């Protein structure tokens, strides 16, 4: 059963890379892709972390970081069909939670601020795209079906079904429609008052 499950997951990871990166022309090319190995290594390290084999989980994580340039803490929870395009410089913290079908570009940080003690890293919903060099800090929530533009700095919750850009982050689209740029906290207040 376990072997079949791993084979299914491996095939899914191969298909995700081929689907998300048009430069990949064959299954053989996928094995050259750093994020492919970073995700495999994370799945193994996370399993060890769950079984409280913390040293070996971190060992795999650190070896993977050296080989791929992608640092994923073994405690991070990552859903299905996760994809990192290019990948160099991606950092994902220990208490980060990532939903299904999430895509990160190179240089993305899902990190902590140093202020929080238990839940220190972001929670990312399903079907989210986070652009290159974006920094998301603290126990913030990124809603499902959201896009965050390259180079953004996210320090507060971003609702679902929006596009947010910039530093400080502003919401510029809601449900695919352009809106007046609004800070996430102001957007949430306006939405509550409208109800």
Image: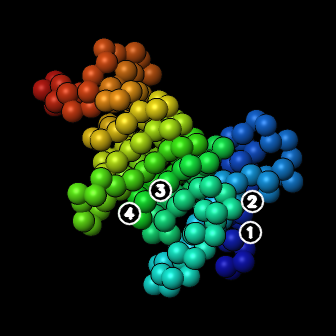
Looking at the image, residue 58 sits to the left or right of residue 12; the answer is left
Q: Quadrant of the N terminus?
A: bottom right
Q: Residue furthest left?
A: 193
Q: Callout 1: few (<14), some (14-19), or many (20+) C-alpha neighbours within 10 Å?
A: few
Could you tell me residue 192's position as x and y percent? Answer: 16, 31
Look at mark 1 in the image and give the residue it sits on.
7
Could you tell me residue 101's position as x and y percent? Answer: 55, 47
Q: SS at mark 2?
A: helix
Q: CA distance from mark 1 to mark 3?
A: 25 Å
Q: Callout 3: few (<14), some (14-19), or many (20+) C-alpha neighbours within 10 Å?
A: many
Mark with earlier residue (4, 2): 2
Of the numbered discs in the image, which one, if any, rests on residue 11?
2
Q: Are the residues flagged by discs 2 and 1 in contact, CB closer than 8 Å?
A: yes
Q: Quadrant of the C terminus?
A: top left
Of the numbered discs in the image, which one, if any, rests on residue 34?
none
Mark with earlier residue (1, 3): 1
Q: SS at mark 1?
A: helix
Q: Callout 2: few (<14), some (14-19), or many (20+) C-alpha neighbours within 10 Å?
A: few
Badge count: 4
Q: Name which quarter of the figure residue 11 lies in.
A: bottom right
Q: CA distance from mark 1 to mark 4?
A: 27 Å
Residue located at (76% from left, 35% from top): 22
Residue located at (31% from left, 30% from top): 168
Q: SS at mark 4?
A: loop
Task: Depth check: give the residue in front, 9 or 27.
Answer: 27
Of the numbered discs in the image, which one, if any, rests on residue 95?
4
Q: Is residue 192 above or below residue 80?
A: above
Residue located at (56% from left, 82% from top): 56
Q: CA distance from mark 3 to mark 2?
A: 24 Å
Look at mark 3 in the image and give the residue it sits on.
92
């Amino acid at each position: 059963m376990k072997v079949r499950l791993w084979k299914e997951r491996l095939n899914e990871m191969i298909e995700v890379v081929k689907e998300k990166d048009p430069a990949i022309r064959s299954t053989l090319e996928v094995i050259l892709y750093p994020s492919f190995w970073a995700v495999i290594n994370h799945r193994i390290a996370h399993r060890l972390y769950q079984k409280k084999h913390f040293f070996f989980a971190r060992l795999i994580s650190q070896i993977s970081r050296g080989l791929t340039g992608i640092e994923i803490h073994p405690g991070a929870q990552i859903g299905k069909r996760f994809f990192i395009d290019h990948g160099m410089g991606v950092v994902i913290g220990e208490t980060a939670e990532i939903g299904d079908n999430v895509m990160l570009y190179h240089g993305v940080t899902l990190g902590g601020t140093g202020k929080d003690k238990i839940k220190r890293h972001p929670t990312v919903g399903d079907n989210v795209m986070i652009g290159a060099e974006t920094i998301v800090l603290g126990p913030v929530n990124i809603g499902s079906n959201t896009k965050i533009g390259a180079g953004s700095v996210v320090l507060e919750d971003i609702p679902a079904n929006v596009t947010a850009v910039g530093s400080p982050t502003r919401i510029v689209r809601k449900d695919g429609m352009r809106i007046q740029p609004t800070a996430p906290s102001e957007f949430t207040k306006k939405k509550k008052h409208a109800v």
